[in-house]
Image: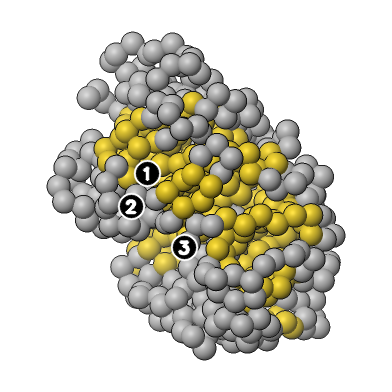
Amino acid sequence: MSEPFFRHQLITAIALCALACSACGGGGATGGDATVIASPPTTAPPAITPPPTPIPPPVSANLVPLAYRLSDTADAAKPDYVKAMATLPSGDVVATLIQSDTIVVDDAGHTLKGSGSDVGVIVYDRNTGEAKTAFSFGGAAPRVVPHGLAADASGNIVVIGYAAGTGIGSSSVDFGAGLVTFNGGEVPFVAKFSPSGLLQWAHVLQGTVGVSPAGCTGSNCDRAWDVAISSSGDIGVVGGFSGQLSLPGGTRLAAAGGSDIFVLVLNAYGVQQAAWTIGGAGNEGGFAGTVASPGGLGEMSIAASGSEWIVQGTFGPSTDFRGTESTSTLHSPLNGVRDVFVARYSGQGRLSAPVWMARATSDVTGGLAAPGALRTDAIGNLYLSLRFNPGVQTVSGCSTPTLSGERLHTLSLTPSFSCRWITRFDFAPGGIHRTVPDAVGNVYLAGWFTGSHAFPNQTLTSRSTRSDVFLARLDASTGVAQWGSGLFATQAVAAPNIPAGLAVDANGHPWIGGQFFASTEFAQTALGQASKVLAVSYTGAIVGNSNDGFVASFRPENGLLR
């Protein structure tokens, strides 16, 4: 293997600000936000050099299907995992992943250098499938995990997630302009990069060390889960936290219960515009919780609708949705434990519509959402996915049957939250991680499942005893399923194949990314068509970290992977 042709970007920092520095919006070493502002580079980044073998021509849709395994170059049990994807203004697709080491990123032999647990960002050409550019960041922190990805109208890339420290002591992360120090277990971050991977700015949001919700195994577990960009270029971030959370503007948010949801709005330059919480006595901000105070890991999404923000999540007793208003707006689950909500806020955080709710009438756990499972189309219609547990369900404006077991649902709402349609899937159990409408009247779903569901073109049945991956396309106006495909273990392995990234390129082709174990078949959208089988790089027994990442592109018009 030749020297990696994508290299970690090194940028000269002109400021590493503390919270006391109001111009930078930074903070003190033990309780503030750490901010990096990078100057334009004085020299161009290293030129991309080709791999040693000739680059193949663009792949025809009629040739052998293609899917990429993203894995470290050594035979080691190190996790590589694509966590989010987005479409660039150019129509190409960008992916972000947990990167354990130097990895191969496409079949042309391009590699991306990394070490430990970095975050990789890769731009794929929509026509050839090759990596066009890539960069990584992370550095000193024991673990840095991306969870969301968005691109603005200029092609700048925003990555959100969390950095995991060593406990109550000091740790640091490098976004490309030097080390940023934080304390405690897990802290949210948001970072913006130019189209070529040069850091523009980054924030680390310091939480309260030693305060954590039930189900958190660290000294604090604060995470950013999803991100969206408004029509004006503002950046909306949603996540979960406990105790207090220091913000870039020098203020702090305080959680009302075990963990709350935070919403942070920044402008294109990283300056705080608004921030508010959604929470009560329960664990709205995530983690396992208890029967009396339930929560779910990362059960929240954010989408932009013009200049407004739409937030999806789960809520418990007496949850306050007031946003930045002074008067409380309280709601409690119909079953007294947990339900799913959708709330619309102005750009400044004022609740601008009645809260929409999917409510369980008889079960003890209610519904579940997932990060990235809420998105909007060009005219403001909403598309959201959720999982209902057993019991009669009441979904505002939608007709749903009595359920015999937990099921997956995708539904569409008008901009005023009236129900357009609801579609049920028979997978049990499972989850829909990403929901993406395209520009021509389709909505794509990526999720994980066990059991079976009959799509018009084929019945998908899982092989893994934990979960396999499905990709489906629905008619955006009616919710009727058009086709389904998936990634299936080639044997009954007790390991979860999971998707976490989904995007649709300018050619109208969906891309999907995630993690897989052992040997996995990338199936087609019709029975009998050729498929491609990938095996992980690690040849030992299956363990928790023996997964590789994957990126695949489907051509739905003829059922072939690219």
As helix, strand or loop, the secondary structure at mark 3 comes to loop
Percent x, y of residue 252: 61, 74
The N terminus lies in which quarter of the figure? top left
As helix, strand or loop, the secondary structure at mark 2 comes to loop
Percent x, y of residue 104: 32, 32
Cβ–Cβ under 8 Å for marks 1 and 2:
yes
**Hey, what amino acid is under mark 1?**
Phe
Q: CA distance from mark 1 to mark 2?
A: 7 Å
Residue 275 appearing in the image: no
Towards the viewer: 234 or 501: 501
Residue identified by numbered label 3: 429
Q: CA distance from mark 3 to mark 2?
A: 13 Å
As helix, strand or loop, the secondary structure at mark 1 comes to strand
Q: Is residue 295 above or below residue 528?
A: below
Percent x, y of residue 506: 64, 28
Towards the viewer: 70 or 394: 394
- Lower position in the chain sequence, tag 3 or tag 2: 3
Q: Residue at x 35, y 24 (%)?
A: 107
**Hey, what amino acid is under mark 2?**
Ser
Q: Residue at x 53, y 47 (%)?
A: 454
Percent x, y of residue 34: 50, 61
Q: Residue at x 46, y 52 (%)?
A: 452
Mark 3 neighbour class, 10 Å CA radius: few under 14, some 14 to 19, many 20 or more: some
Q: CA distance from mark 1 to mark 3?
A: 16 Å
Towards the viewer: 433 or 557: 557
Q: Which mark is residue 488?
A: 1
Mark 1 neighbour class, 10 Å CA radius: few under 14, some 14 to 19, many 20 or more: many
Cβ–Cβ under 8 Å for marks 1 and 3:
no
